[in-house]
Amino acid sequence: MDSLMTKDAARALGVSQRQVTDLLRAGKLSGEQLSDGTWLVTPRSISERRSLNAGAGRTWSAASSWALLGELSGQSSTGLSQSTSARIRRRIRMSTAEEIARKVASRTVGHRYTADSIAKTASELVLTGRSAADAIDTELTSQTQVVEGYLRDETLESFARRHLLSSDNNGAVTIYERHDSLNFEGLYAPDAVIAADLVRSTSTRERSAGLAALEEMRQRWLAKHTR
């Protein structure tokens, strides 16, 4: 399907054209700007944003979102004030998995590429979302034709140059910006991060699995922290 004009994207998302342009500039929608200044939006990024219902209500800050996902994954975020920690725990108690997925949606920006070797590119990323689906749901098979992941200890520019990645809004490789407060040393991202990224999928089955995993983690957390 061809890219959409901002007015059509705005209608699909239920927001203004200016909001669509702001989302494009912030990297929260994928698209390209033509030489005359006109923006075109990829249908895939619209579908992903609609699946998260990210246009509804205020999202949480990136720091709070990462800290909450770390808490659900059993990792303690560093440098948080007592009031921030209390607010994060209150959000876990009061929010559904759907609300959590929606509120943390803007914590990271995905950059899409095409790669000469998907397997080699994947081997040097911390996998998440569709590339790590079987880590949180044994009934799902992790996708091998697409790659979703976070960088380890390298800049995006350096990684893209070393792997001969070409920027492509419809590419099979998605690299998300990460946050240094969480441990990303293993093969996979923390479980709650994988689940939240899986909810971005336009596949109903994958999105449902991500939500189910988030809710299971929330229930485990509640059982541990509720007296």
Image (tube, helix red, strand yellow):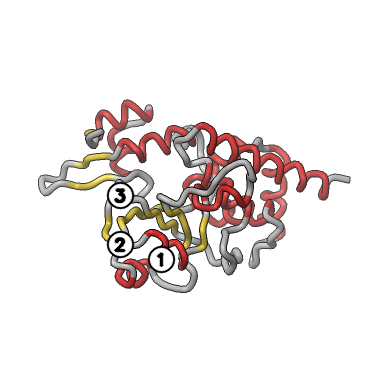
Residue 196 - label = none
The residue labelled by disc 1 is 120
- Identify residue type, mark 3: Arg
Is the residue 217 above or below the residue 4 in the image?
below
- Provide the residue designation for mark 2: 116
Q: Residues within 10 Å of mark 3 (few under 14, many from 20)?
A: some
Q: Disc 2 versus disc 1: distance between alpha carbons?
A: 9 Å
In percent of width and height, residue 63 lies at 55, 57
The quadrant of the image that shows the N terminus is top left
Q: Secondary structure at mark 2?
A: loop
Residue 90, image quadrant: top right
Q: Position of residue 129 (x, y in %)?
A: 51, 49
> Could you tell whether 77 is left or right of 44 in the image?
right
Check the image and report above or below for 23 versus 122.
Answer: above
For disc 2, the neighbor class at 10 Å (few under 14, some 14 to 19, many from 20) is few
Q: CA distance from mark 3 to mark 2?
A: 27 Å
Query: Which type of secondary structure does the marked residue at label 1 adopt?
Result: helix
Q: Residue at x 63, y 48 (%)?
A: 136
Question: What residue does disc 3 label?
Answer: 25
- Callout 2–callout 1 Cβ contact below 8 Å: yes
